[in-house]
Amino acid sequence: MNGSATFTGLTALADMLAGLDWPTLAESSGVGVWIGDPDDGDHAGAGMTESVVVVSQPESPEQEWATIGTFARKEQFAAVVVVTSLIPGRTCREVICRIQELTQAVEGAVRDAARLLPQSSISPVADLAEAGVVGIGISSPAWSVQPTQEGYGGRAVIRVGFQARI
């Protein structure tokens, strides 16, 4: 086992989101999901009009040492998920509705994972549980919509919090 659950937490979250059936939209080239930089040219320039990206840098890793039989520690950290929709020709209202739809899918996946963690052998949370993650939760999205040269585009930033005992 690794000395920190942050590595597995972020990669398992990205894998879980990549496995979702994303709501389709005729004008969309599909929802790209990856871990890394939301503005990564290799992904963003590949014709993707919508994306969900787990930023590859955990926020605020906090640790608390405790004795749990043998020496162990409690770790709390957060992952940032960036949801982007840049479909040409969309109105501001259409982009708001689409960002809401995509963020609801992320929230649903995290809520399902939180419910499944006690039954740790069930996919998609088996990797999280094996890494020592005992809790996962989500914050309200911070979002914005701006005009572009081809209509409107939007982005939401969501914090996903983790608790682990390692």
Image (cartoon, rainbow, N blue to C red):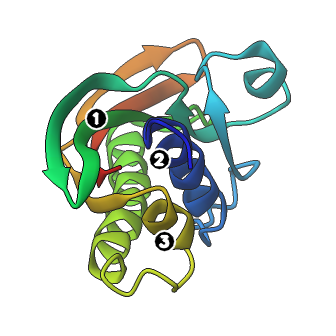
Residue at 50% x, 65% y is: 130
Instruction: Identify whether 112 is placed above or below 106.
Output: below
Cβ atoms under marks 1 and 2 closer than 8 Å: yes
As rendered, which of 20 and 47 lies closer to the eye? 20
Q: Which mark is residue 107?
A: none
Q: Is residue 39 left or right of residue 166?
A: right
Q: Is residue 46 left or right of residue 29?
A: right
Q: CA distance from mark 1 to mark 3?
A: 17 Å
User: Residue 92's x, y, as percent?
Assistant: 35, 34
Instruction: Identify whether 151 is placed above or below 15.
Output: above
Mark 3 is surrounded, within 10 Å at the Cα level, by few (under 14), some (14 to 19) or many (20 or more) other residues, namely: many
User: Residue 90's x, y, as percent?
Assistant: 51, 38
Lower position in the chain sequence, tag 1 or tag 3: 1
Determine the image quadrant of residue 21: bottom right
Q: Which mark is residue 77?
A: 1
Lower position in the chain sequence, tag 2 or tag 3: 2
Question: Residue under circle 3?
Answer: 125
Residue at 47% x, 61% y is: 128
Please tell me whether mark 2 sits on a helix, a strand or a loop. Answer: helix
Instruction: Identify whether 31 is placed above or below 158.
Output: below
Residue at 42% x, 30% y is: 154
Please tell me whether mark 3 sits on a helix, a strand or a loop. Answer: loop
Question: Residue under circle 2?
Answer: 9
User: Residue flagged by tag 1: what amino acid is it?
Assistant: Phe
As rendered, which of 98 and 52 lies closer to the eye? 52
- Please, which residue is most extreme toward the front here? 70
